Amino acid sequence: MPHLAQINIGRLLAPIDDPQIADFKNNLDAINDLAEGSVGFVWRLKGDNNNATDFHPFGDELDIVNMSVWESVDTLKAFAFQSEHVAFMKRRREWFIKYPTAYMALWWIPVGHIPTVEEAQERLRSLDDHGPTSFAFTFGQLFSPTL
């Protein structure tokens, strides 16, 4: 069974070291540890700080990226919507502005494949250009693996 890749980008209200963002930044390790300890977790993008806040692939330092790989849609959903992660999602307006384009994409990958940021950017562009397809989709319109 293929694995599920995901990217989620957000535009911060202020730089990551700004006091306004401190509660978000100070909880990144705990949320990332929660993800890594979750059933079905496979991989996540990390930089020098054990998180992905030092990656700015979209050209704006206020844009931060989260990428991960999961064994299934259900395991990603369990982490995202049924764990302590939910409490932080509910607070997202304290730290993020509404992103102007597609900000989250899901896609199927072969087991063992590690997605690149460039690959993820292509999936987001596809969502903007074509809406959900088997190439890039969302929780709102899932597609079965076609690998």
Image (cartoon, rainbow, N blue to C red):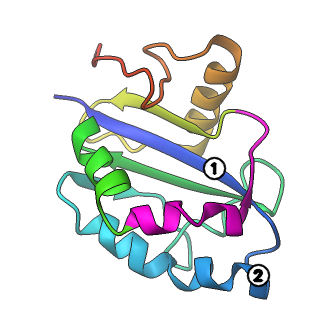
Counting every numbered tag in the picture gives 2
Left or right for 47, reference 54: left
Task: Find residue 110 and report its image quarter.
Answer: top left
Question: Which three-letter amino acid code belongs to the residue tagged 2?
Answer: Gln
Left or right for 22, reference 137: right
Residue 147 in picture, x, y percent from top left = 28, 16
Residue 36 highlighted magenta (yes or no): no
Residue 72 can be seen in this image:
no
Earlier sequence position, callout 1 versus callout 2: 1
Read off the residue under disc 1. 9
Residue range of the region highlighted in magenta in the rendering: 85-101
Residue 43 to residue 1: above or below: below
Residue 102 can be seen in this image:
yes
Identify the element where label 2 is drawn: helix
Label annotation for residue 18: none
Q: Nearer the viewer, mark 1 or mark 2?
A: 2
Read off the residue under disc 2. 20
Residue 43 to residue 124: above or below: below
Residue 70 in picture, x, y percent from top left = 29, 46
Residue sitting nearer the eye, 81 or 137: 81
Residue 88 highlighted magenta (yes or no): yes
Residue sitting nearer the eye, 134 or 121: 134
Question: Which three-letter amino acid code belongs to the residue tagged 1?
Answer: Ile
Residue sitting nearer the eye, 116 or 128: 128
